[in-house]
């Protein structure tokens, strides 16, 4: 059973203001490369009607040299509030990209200063900007001057344990005009290993006046509550906890607004969502969508009888019909063992 203090419920009861933008939810769906496309966001939106969504991160340099916008920038009016996340190290290119993002309907422009992946950092983007704070500040100033919507930053606590500079970095981002900062409580060197150091999020909250969003290890409603209690953050951003579990943002949001837990989806609910995800990816992206769906399907297949074997089958599907047949067969299997054992269906938590 998840617990929350009355004081925290009261603190979170008012709308969150990011500059001129007022949000009805303090729970965010993180931008995730190769994951948070239009199809995934549609599913998250169903369960989280008012939470901020994010596109996959967009390369500002790549955008500069093309006339047509990449598909990852495609958004729908029903997705709002939504942010388009950009990455690069060139202030002028990022300013230009931000204008195109706003023209597409972005409610905020988010600058990625936290991605730890080598192919991003070696070109000066992502978390490498933690080592170049003046360039990071110049980027924020340029983007703020270029657009009328709030500009936000997502970053980490530092490059490594010996280079944790998030406090001065966050203050510099605020001074440059950023109107919200999301802090992933790990260093670049950590990647996604080891526990997130939420105490640094608390310290950031103490030194800036803009909203601070906590990120890192949000795998359950309880984890989100614990982060908010321990850090005083203004909201939380769910990332890897939503892989194969697009219900999480909505579950956290509902609890923070009501103090009540939503029923967890059953194993069959999860597989039905997986099947829908597969079909929608094919409709949106064709055969490439099927290939992309393989990883999603393996994420959905966990925590219930036969899940390991099911993952192996779903990882190599060649078409939609094959994937749906495998999923439907396993749903039937789960229904049969439930009927025979007279036990309720397995409920899956995040």
Image (cartoon, rainbow, N blue to C red):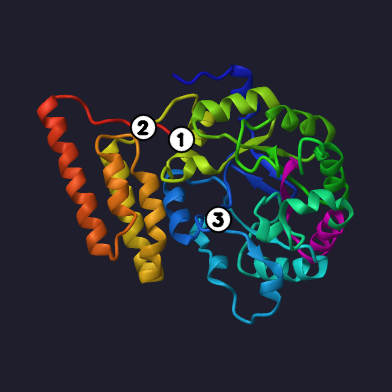
Residue pictured at 50% horizontal, 55% vertical: 35
How many residues crowd mark 2 within 10 Å: few (<14), some (14–19), many (20+)?
some
Say whether disc 3 or disc 2 marks the residue closer to the N-terminus.
3
Which of labels 1 and 3 is toward the front? 1
Q: Residue 145 lies in magenta, yes or no?
A: yes
- The residue lying toward the viewer, choosing from 122 and 225, is 122
The N terminus, quarter of image: top left
Q: Residue 224 lies in magenta, yes or no?
A: no
- The region drawn magenta spans 136-158
Q: Residue 264, labelled with which disc?
A: 2
Residue holding disc 1: 251
> How far from the left and from the top, in percent, is residue 289?
39, 65
> Is 245 placed left or right of 272 in the picture?
right
> How far from the left and from the top, in percent, is residue 29?
55, 46
- The residue lying toward the viewer, choosing from 124 and 178, is 124
Does residue 3 sit above or below 167 in this rendering? above
Cα separation, mark 1 vs mark 2, equals 9 Å
- Label 1–label 2 contact, CB within 8 A: yes
Say whether disc 1 or disc 3 marks the residue closer to the N-terminus.
3
- Label 1–label 3 contact, CB within 8 A: no
Residue pictured at 60% horizontal, 41% vertical: 192
């Amino acid at each position: 059973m998840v617990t929350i203090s009355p004081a925290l419920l009261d603190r979170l009861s008012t709308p969150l203001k990011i500059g001129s933008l007022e949000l009805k939810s303090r729970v965010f769906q993180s931008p995730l490369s190769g994951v948070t496309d239009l199809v995934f966001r549609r599913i998250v939106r169903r369960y989280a009607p008012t939470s901020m969504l994010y596109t996959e991160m967009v390369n500002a340099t790549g955008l500069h040299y093309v006339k047509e916008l990449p598909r990852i920038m495609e958004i729908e009016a029903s997705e709002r509030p939504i942010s388009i996340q950009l990455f690069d190290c060139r202030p002028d290119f990022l300013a230009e990209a931000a204008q195109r993002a706003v023209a597409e309907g972005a409610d905020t422009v988010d600058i990625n200063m936290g991605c730890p992946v080598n192919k991003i950092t070696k070109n000066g983007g992502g978390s490498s900007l933690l080592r170049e704070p003046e360039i990071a500040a110049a980027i924020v100033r340029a983007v703020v001057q270029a657009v009328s919507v709030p500009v936000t930053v997502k970053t980490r606590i530092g490059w490594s344990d010996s280079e944790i500079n998030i406090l001065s970095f966050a203050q510099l981002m605020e001074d440059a005009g950023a109107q919200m900062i999301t802090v992933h409580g790990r260093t670049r060197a950590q990647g996604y290993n080891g526990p997130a150091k939420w105490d640094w999020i608390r310290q950031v909250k103490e030194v800036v006046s803009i909203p601070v969003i906590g990120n890192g290890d949000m795998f359950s409603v309880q984890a989100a509550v614990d982060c908010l209690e321990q850090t005083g953050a203004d909201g939380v951003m769910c990332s890897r906890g939503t892989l194969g579990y697009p219900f999480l943002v909505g579950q956290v949001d509902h609890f923070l607004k009501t103090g009540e837990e939503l029923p967890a989806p059953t194993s069959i609910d999860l597989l039905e969502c997986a099947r829908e995800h597969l079909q929608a990816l094919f409709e949106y992206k064709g055969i490439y969508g099927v290939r992309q769906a393989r990883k999603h399907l393996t994420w959905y297949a966990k925590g219930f009888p036969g899940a390991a074997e099911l993952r192996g089958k779903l990882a190599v599907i060649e078409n939609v019909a094959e994937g749906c047949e495998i999923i439907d067969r396993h749903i039937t299997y789960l229904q049969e063992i439930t009927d025979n054992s007279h036990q309720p269906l397995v409920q899956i938590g995040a």
